[in-house]
Amino acid sequence: MSKPSDLVQGTLDMLLLKILALEPMNGFAVSQRLKQVSSDVLQVSDGSLYPALHKLEQEGWITAEWKTSERGRRAKYYSLTRLGHRQLEKEADNWGRLSSAISRVVKLKEA
Amino acid sequence: MQPEHWLYTIPLRLRSLFRRREADMDLDDELRDHVERKTEEYIAKGLAREEARRQARLEMGGLEKRKEECRETRRVNWIQDLMHDLHFGLRMLRKSPGFTAIAILTVALGIGATTAMFSLVDATLLHPLPYPHAEELVRVEDDLPGEGATDAGISIPEWKDLQRSGIFQYVVPEIFGSANLTGASQPSRVQYEGVGPGYFAMLGVKPELGETFDPENQTPGFTLDTVITDGLWKRAFGSDPHILGKSIRMDNDLFRVIGVMPPGFRDPGRTVDERNTEQWAELGFSDNPVEASNRSLRLPLETVGRLKPGLTLAAAQSQLDALVASLQKQFPDAYPAEGQWTVRLVPLKENVVGNVRQGLILLLGAVGLVLLIGCVNVANLLLARASARSWEMAMRQALGAARKRLVRQLLTETLLLSVLGGAVGFVILLCMKGFLLRLIPESLPRLNDLSINWTVMLFALAASLAAGIIFGLAPARQAGHLDLANALRQGRGSRGSAEQARTRRVLVVTEFALSLVLMVAAGLLLRSFWDLYKAPLGFNPQHVMSVQLWLPSPNDPKTDIYGTASQEAVFARELLRRSRLLPGVREAALGAEPSIPLQHDGNRSQLIVEGRETQSKQPPLVERSEVTPEYFHLLEIPVLRGRLFNDGDDEKAPLVAVVNQAMARTYWRDEDPLGKRLMLGRGRPGVGLHARKTWITIVGVIADARTESLAKASVPQIYLSLYQDTPKELAIFLRGELSASAIPEEVREMVQSVNPELPVYGAKTLDEAVSASLEQRRFSMKIVAVFAITALLLAALGIYGVVSYIVSERTRDIGIRLALGADRGKILAMVLRQGLGLAMAGAAVGLVGSVIVSHLMAGLLYGVMPTDPLTFAGVTLVLTVVALAACYIPARRAMRVDPMIALRYE
């Protein structure tokens, strides 16, 4: 499974979960929304998106539903499960601790 | 994982597993939908439709690859993969039916043969004793190395000491013999065994009907009770439902049947006769007919025991050694120091297994070699196929298949092949089981029936898998290390890499080496057999038949009608007179059973030579037998010195004996044995002569004859006159133009017209006896020969394949040479040389292996050295010729190459 070069795998999962926590949507919409809310900084490649989504589904953190979309096509809509919410909280906590630790190191006064 | 997790994920995984196509379609839809939306976005941004679509597709990447990645996140993948691989493998195998057929057949042959041999080994070597906790069963043997005696028997007080020693749960003495059974449908001769009361409890087998002996029984002598086998019950009593309580007579002694043993129960004796025991009598061994109080009197009993549970053989042996030491101190007269009396514990299965172990291991090794060669052949085939498929493999990898996945798939394919082959072989084995069972010689001790049980099936499966791994490893590994660019460039008709070719050559060399080893083994066994077969017998078995009969030896001597030598002599002479009247008979003679050549284990008595009585407390043993005077002439054994018996040597005359040269040389090396006197001690009980303190004079010396065993040229033997003794087991010898089918009945009628209660049995020609004694060797030799030929054929096939391959590989090269004017004969020579080179390399390696193996089997050879140059040279020659023949066809093809076509060939 190819990993996105600009994001660590674990954080990708967390970001996807968060987007889906906002509202249920399909895969394309998730990548669009992520790009939008991060002002184009966080972009997930199409090749990494779907394997990641399927993995999240496998773990039971998100669940999917097939609906007929606006254009009359079948589309798969993902939403967060209760387990997913818990996992999101956990990962968000971890991320918080990690990022503040990194910030502290980076902000150290140089001699 | 929390339970909720499972709830969410199980339906998903199950769906992936079982509704794969739907899941697949969904995945497809999902990804395409994404591409569509992206396309629309690009169009909205101003790109042309085509450009937008192209851009969207590019960003998604290869659809198949993405789908594969998504699928891989589903952790139920490996089952799916396996199913897929198996399906794919089956399809591939179906596509090349020729290859598949050869491969499966080769594997089937190898696995089938190996499994058959293994089941034989399983029944005879691994579980020879079908009794509970058989590892606790031992034989107790007394040795007196100071007197040169092994297994010298045991005295009753000593046995009682063993019982009290705390080493054994049970220790039981046994006496074997045969008796006339009367009171059944026909008088017959039956092997019986007198055993101590603990016998059945020791072996731990329950009777089918009735009961067995009570181990607590204190009766000192024979009791009335007897137990019989299921076989005897069916044969002699027609499965009489009222068998229990029935009275029967053994040698006119009355017994009462109290139990019947289940079918398949046999005594774990040392000889075929002992194992064929059909009747057990309970003997207290404390009184008449057994002398119970004399510690120095060793009785020729076999002693069997069951160790206390948890006691190892080594621990028991050391406890026994301690007991022996203390008894020696306590009773110095009974155990003189020069005798060096020791008592050995031998695991009981040695009885059954002892002398066949080496032979069977050899056969198992041989068949393993054949299997190995078969595997090598299949490996070669697979490698050739892998070379041809390298384009396919390269393409698949270029399209995104993982290397590991491909390797796994190839391995699955080969394992499928090997398991299929193994299954086919197993089925063939099941079908041929009856036929194979008949091939096994009778003398191979088998207490168990040969059965295809779970162990054997498991072995077949394991062997198939192992075979598959062995021959699958090379091609799979090579697929994993494929040079993609090279393979793709070579196109569909690719030939594979140089490394693949080299591996194939190595494999062929291995095949030849292994074949050589097998052929040398077969050759050596063949020569051993031939030498033994051709060994001068010292007697002439042609046109001679022997028929056995049994005179009863009842426990009460007063009821014995042949009790004295004169009484028996009258009977004997009458028998001889009537025998000479039978149709076709030219000569007739009578002898005790041990005089039948090549039949018996031997009957030995203690020998005391006049003038040397005090030399040792434990006298040496010699083979003895009683015969009428005509015996030697009938068998054409020449007399070298002195005279043979005549009718004047009867009961009233002094006892005389005739010895053979071996005995004369052993005991009277520098003297003339004629006129020397000796005494003979106890024979085995039930064989007539009890110790008589009378001197016997030697009157003649005959030439050595191999009447004891074909392999032993000179065994000291002594013959007594039948008219001076009362042996009970007799044989009638007839020479002439005899009808092998009519004689048994004619002799039976003749004997029973003299005494209707005597059983007559065991009629056979001496030629048969000679042949039967070679049976086991013949069996080994035949089997190894079959293996060797199979191996050679497989190796020839292998070299044919490789040389063909070499030729097609170098077709262009050959075409060029021919175009440049090379002589076609030279091309032929070149190819032949290549093939021969491989064969010679194989032969060289094989020779080394053969020397090692032949030294390992030295114990099975007779009359030929393990490094016999004739065999080695002959085998190498055969190998070379076969290799040349196998190379010839492809070489001719090379010779016929049309340079025009070859050069055009791309």
Image: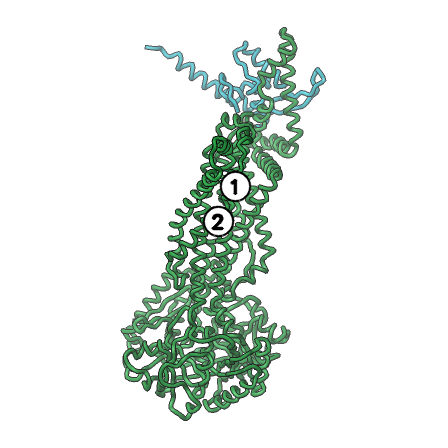
Chain colours: A cyan, B green
Residue projecting furthest to the top: B46
Indicate which disc, 1 or 2, sits on the residue closer to the N terminus: 2
SS at mark 1 in the image: helix
Residue placed most toward the observer, A107 or B428:
B428
- Residue B647 appears at what percent x and percent y? 44, 90
For mark 2, what is the residue? B882
Q: Quadrant of residue B874?
A: bottom left
- Residue B29 appears at what percent x and percent y? 66, 22
Residue B699: which numbered mark, if any? none
Please, is residue B418 above or below residue B17 in the view? below
Q: Chain of mark 2?
A: B
Residue type highlighted by circle 2: Val
Residue placed most toward the observer, B709 or A29:
B709
Please, is residue B100 above or below residue B147 in the view? above
- Residue B453 appears at what percent x and percent y? 56, 55
Residue B892: which numbered mark, if any? 1
The span from disc 1 to disc 2 (Cα, nearest Å) is: 16 Å
Residue placed most toward the observer, B596 or B498:
B498
B103 left or right, relative to B319 = right
B345 left or right, relative to B477 = left
Q: Chain of mark 1?
A: B
Say which residue appears at 50% left-offset and 83% top-offset.
B588
Are the residues under marks 1 and 2 on the same chain?
yes
Q: Quadrant of residue B631?
A: bottom left
Please, is residue B118 above or below residue A36 in the view? below
Q: Quadrant of residue A74?
A: top right
State which quarter of the image contains the C terminus of chain B: top right
Question: What crowding class fits label 2: few (fewer than 14 Cα within 10 Å), some (14-19), or many (20 or more)?
Answer: some
